[in-house]
Amino acid sequence: MIRQMSQRRMSPKNKRLMALSLFIIFALFIFYDVYHLIVPNTSHETSIRMEIVEALILLLGGAAFISLWILTKNEERNEIRFEKEIGQMKAERDEWKERSAQLIKDFQDYILTHFDYWKLTTSEKEVGLFLLKGMSFKEIAQIRNVSERTIRNQSLSIYSKSGLAGKHELASYFLEELFQLKAQ
């Protein structure tokens, strides 16, 4: 029974109830013992019954105490195990973030290398990156604090220098290159 209780997860409310029961059992034991000392014992048979009752109260309290102690120990072990697992998961997450950040940086460098090869200006490179992110001319114009017409002209210059037809072809070019690099 104690082993079964130790394998089950006990709610905080049940733990409090068990602790309260344990307290009540020992309080009864002490009260019964004090009562036994105050009231004179007239019969030997009554004395034996009182000793049996005291022994049962003590055994019940001891069993409750051992059960509570085992449950607490198991929860401590589980908590330590969970903390280790969480630590491992965080380490794996951080490692993945680090690897992903490097891959993203490498891909950005790859894109910028193509922009350099196409001889794009600094402004055109910036607009090109915004276009690759899927932003509209209006959004790019607001970010760069210029007119939409300026962005439209810079994008036409990007397409002309790269030999690509538009925003979708620009994005497709890099995605296709990315997938070809991965396959090699």
Image: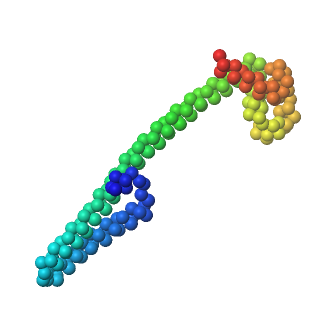
Tally the marks. Answer: 0
Q: Nearer the viewer, residue 53 or 90?
A: 53
Q: Nearer the viewer, residue 178 or 126?
A: 178
The answer to whether residue 6 is left or right of residue 38 is right
The quadrant of the image that shows the N terminus is bottom left
Residue 176 horizontal side relative to residue 69, left or right: right
Q: Is residue 46 above or below residue 156?
A: below
- Please tell me whether residue 39 is drawn above or below residue 30 in the rendered image: below
Q: Name the residue at the front extreme.
A: 45
One can see residue 71 in this view: no
Coordinates of residue 25 in the picture (x, y in percent): 29, 70
Question: Which of the 4 quarters of the picture holds residue 72?
Answer: bottom left
Residue 112: where, in percent of width, then height?
A: 70, 23
Please tell me whether residue 161 is drawn above or below residue 123 in the rendered image: above
Identified at 28% across, 65% down, the residue is 60
Q: Nearer the viewer, residue 134 or 59?
A: 59
- Give coordinates of residue 179: x percent, y percent: 69, 22
Residue at (22% x, 76% y) in the render:
32
What is the x, y in percent for residue 80?
A: 39, 45
Would residue 170 be visible to someone looking at this image? yes
36 sits to left or right of 167 = left
Residue at 78% from the left image edge and 36% from the top image edge: 135
Position of the C terminus, as image quadrant, is top right
